[in-house]
Image (cartoon, grey):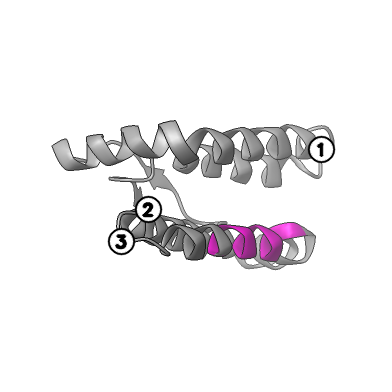
Amino acid sequence: MNFIGNIIWLVFGGIIAFILWSIAGLILCVTIIGIPFGIQCFKIAKFVLWPFGKEIELGHFGAGGLLFNIIWLIFFGWEFAIAHLVIGAIFCITIIGIPFGLQHFKFAQLGLIPFGAKIR
């Protein structure tokens, strides 16, 4: 069932979300300071490409991860989180779209706190 969900996901916007997260990663990697943030974007892009059957575990970060999460949240995270929350709410309008909306809600969590998150 996860395989079918992922295929449908790719057709109805998963590839676009993957491309957008990858472009954000490329833009952030332009400067040396932005490289850690760009790497997180690439990790999230990989997750966005094939999300069904995977879960997110938040909160395994140290002091450095906390600092990076705060910087991320101030400059980048809130835009990503709001975008995924809005898209998820739109998907949840129909019964068929609810599984896809729930995936976007998972991405909103990663959009807020990417450092220290584990994807299983």
| Relative horizontal placement of residue 88, taking residue 52 as reference (left or right) | right
Indicate the position of residue 53 as horizontal and vertical percent values. 52, 57
User: Toward which corner of the image does residue 13 lie, by quadrant?
Assistant: bottom right
The CA span between labels 2 and 1 is 35 Å
Q: Closer to the observer: label 2 or label 1?
A: 2
- At label 1, the amino acid type is Ile
Dot 3: element: loop
- At label 2, the amino acid type is Phe
Q: Closer to the observer: label 1 or label 3?
A: 3
- At label 3, the amino acid type is Ile
| Relative horizontal placement of residue 72, taking residue 97 as reference (left or right) | left
Which residue position holds label 1?
Answer: 95
Give, as a single range, the part of the protein colored magenta.
Answer: 13-22
Is 14 a magenta residue?
A: yes
- Foreground of the two, 12 or 37: 37
Q: Which mark is residue 32?
A: 3
Q: Are marks 2 and 1 in contact (CB under 8 Å)?
A: no
User: Toward which corner of the image does residue 24 lie, by quadrant?
Assistant: bottom right
Indicate the position of residue 20 as horizontal and vertical percent values. 62, 59
